Image (cartoon, rainbow, N blue to C red):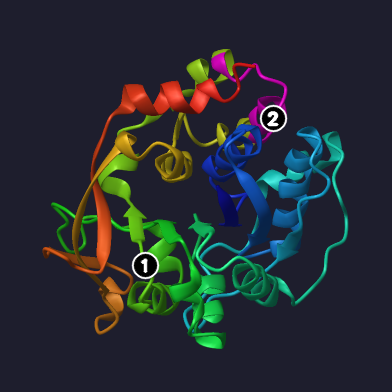
Amino acid sequence: MKVLFDTDIGSDIDDAVCLAYLLANPACDLLGITTVTGQPEKRAQLASALCLAAGREDIPIYPGAPDPLLVAQRQPEAQQAAALARWPHRETFPRGEAVEFMRRTIRAHPGEVTLLTVGPLTNLGLLFRTDPEIPGLLKRLVMMAGHFTGQAAGSGHVDWNSICDPHAAAIAYQAPAAVHRSVGLDVTTKVVLPAAEVRARFSAPLLRPVLDFAEIWFAHAREITFHDPLAAVSIFDEAVCGFKRGRVEIELASPRLEGYTHWSPEPGGPHEVALKVDPGRFFEQFFGVFAG
């Protein structure tokens, strides 16, 4: 499975967990990594540390957009970069080339690439505006984004990736991808491990740097919610989530609610959203790729 991975690794620890899964999965042909939001070069360095730990120096890594399209930056720093001194990593990367790299790679493999996005959608918005044909050239677009059921305005149940760049999110949801999937908070919040269990189970060599990054996360959190890894696992095991078709629109009219996802079921609608998850199956699939 050819995958392009767009990530804000370095803030929530689940991005690093997700990348480790992709690197360990023998069914994944990881074509490249792009980073997004504040300090994208530091985020690229974190991604390179995991690639080096996996023996994959060949994977291209491109720092992407540092700031949202229009709104103020909510995520200026990559806190987990504090652990970089303990792990070999690349220091320098091509600058200003992330969107062109994505465009070029997708055009080189029409109908074959799954674009997996697990951060603010700025790079995606720029890509789709730069080359409007790209969504139709994807095999599928899979986004860790959104919250689709039981959402009340102001409830706090709103996805970080959508509100960090709501205008880019709106561009992403308007894109006519052949398969347009969202794995959002409806399901990701049901796959959680407490810190003690993470420390006990993250014993594989590739998960050791991830655990080191996670200790920075655990300074203010007592668990890991596997938001991004669930989106990744759903690419390779479609039965881990139950999807329903409908239509998603991003709220832009109200400044207070910018980035909220409005979803309505619709047979044959342009979007698939995950509404069910099998947590046991997810953890079996996730840890299974590290068993060797």
Secondary structure beneath dot 1 equals loop
Q: Is residue 205 left or right of residue 253?
A: right
Question: On the image, which quarter does residue 176 sit in?
Answer: bottom left
Mark earlier in primary sequence (1, 2): 1
The picture quadrant where one finds residue 36 is bottom right
Query: Which residue is nearer to you in this view: 15 or 244?
Result: 244
Relative to 158, say whether 257 is above or below. below
| Residue nearer the viewer, 264 or 223 | 264
The residue located at (65%, 49%) in the rendering is: 30
The residue range painted magenta reads 201-213
Up the image or down, 84 lies above or below 195; here it is: below
Q: Is residue 135 above or below residue 17?
A: below
Horizontal and vertical percent position of residue 204: 66, 19
Taking the magenta stretch, the answer to whether it contains residue 206 is: yes
Q: Would residue 65 be seen by someone viewing this image from the given angle? A: no
Label 1 sits on residue: 178
**Residue 288, how many percent across, how many down?**
52, 21
Contact check, label 1 and label 2, Cβ < 8 Å: no
Judging from the image, what secondary structure is the residue with disc 2 in? helix
- In the picture as drawn, the residue positioned furthest to the top comes out as 200
- Give amino acid for label 1: Ala
Q: What residue appears at the point 16 percent right and 65 percent down from the top-left corner?
A: 268
What is the three-letter code of the residue carrying label 2?
Asp
x and y, in percent, of residue 20 in the image: 63, 36
Residue 171 image point, x, y percent: 40, 79
Which is closer to the viewer, label 1 or label 2? 1
Q: Which residue is mark 2?
A: 212
Examine the rendering and report whether any part of residue 99 can be seen. Answer: yes
